[in-house]
Image (spheres, grey):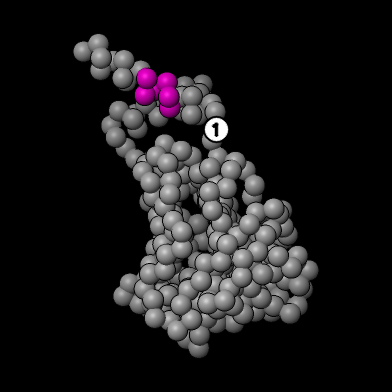
Amino acid sequence: MKKSLIFSLLLANVSFGIPISSITWQSAQSITGDSDVKTNGSLLYAYNVGASGVAGTTVNGVAFLAYAFASNYSSQTVTVGSVSMTESPGVLVSSNTLGGSSAPFTSLSSGYQTLLGSGGSASNPASITVAFGGLTSGQQYLVQWWTNNSANGKIDVELGLNNTTATSGLNTATLDANTTNVAGGPGQYVTGTFTAAGTSQTMVLSASGSDAPLINAFQVRAVPEPSSLALVAAACGALTLRRRRK
């Protein structure tokens, strides 16, 4: 029954050209340890976001490369590899001092502390459009991102770092940067999946009021599901055969 429903939905999407491009988010999870970092499928890329000088790090066997924002708050767009982050008409801002000197942050591994101790944000209007590139159309991907402000401070004197909402199509996920609201408190992470409708996928990070969005790190992984991919292939094959007979 379940496979029949999936097949019908996939066939409808192929027939009518509906892009399967919104990210379907899971529930937000509190940061607890290295095992938070997903290792499903194969890694496309992973980045540690922060200000100039931010370091790369490895957590749970996943190598996060440095994704540095300009330290002088002068850039509207930063591109590293196949990923771009854009804020307009404001600018991108960042910090490498988002860690804490108290537990539970200090109980995390050194690699995880490095990953969570830096992050990128945005000035007014506080939003960041993240464009994940280098994708293969029709491939299913897992995206995971973190927000953490264990320092319990601000990105500058005006912008608070509390909740960040990721929007993709009609789907949203909201993460808390510090679940205890005291120094040393942990933030949250979330995972989502999407099927690429082209070579890129976007999500918009936003905050409310005088707060700013915060992204500390992210990764994108290819996660093929043989049964689902077989259904897609069957749907495409059936449509091709039908067209040839006409």
What is the x, y in percent for residue 136?
Answer: 42, 41
**Relative to 19, is 203 above or below?**
below
Tell me the residue at 42%/36% (across/down).
138
Task: Note whether residue 160 is visible.
Answer: no
Tell me the residue at 53%/77% (across/down).
52
**Relative to 42, is 16 above or below?**
above
User: How would you rate the neighbour count of disc 1 (Cα within 10 Å): few for under 14, some for 14-19, many for 20 or more?
Assistant: few
Amino acid at circle 1: Glu
Most foreground residue, 222 or 158: 222
Give the magenta-colored segment's residue range: 232-237
- Quadrant for the C terminus in the image: top left
Name the outermost residue toward the bottom.
157
Tell me the residue at 61%/70% (across/down).
55
What's the magenta bit mostly, secondary-structure-wise? helix
Label 1, on which residue?
225
Quick check: is 236 in the magenta stretch? yes
Based on the displayed image, in which of its 4 quarters is residue 178 positioned?
Answer: bottom right
Image position of 15 (left or right of 175)? left
Question: Dot 1 lies on which element?
Answer: loop
Tell me the residue at 40%/29% (across/down).
10
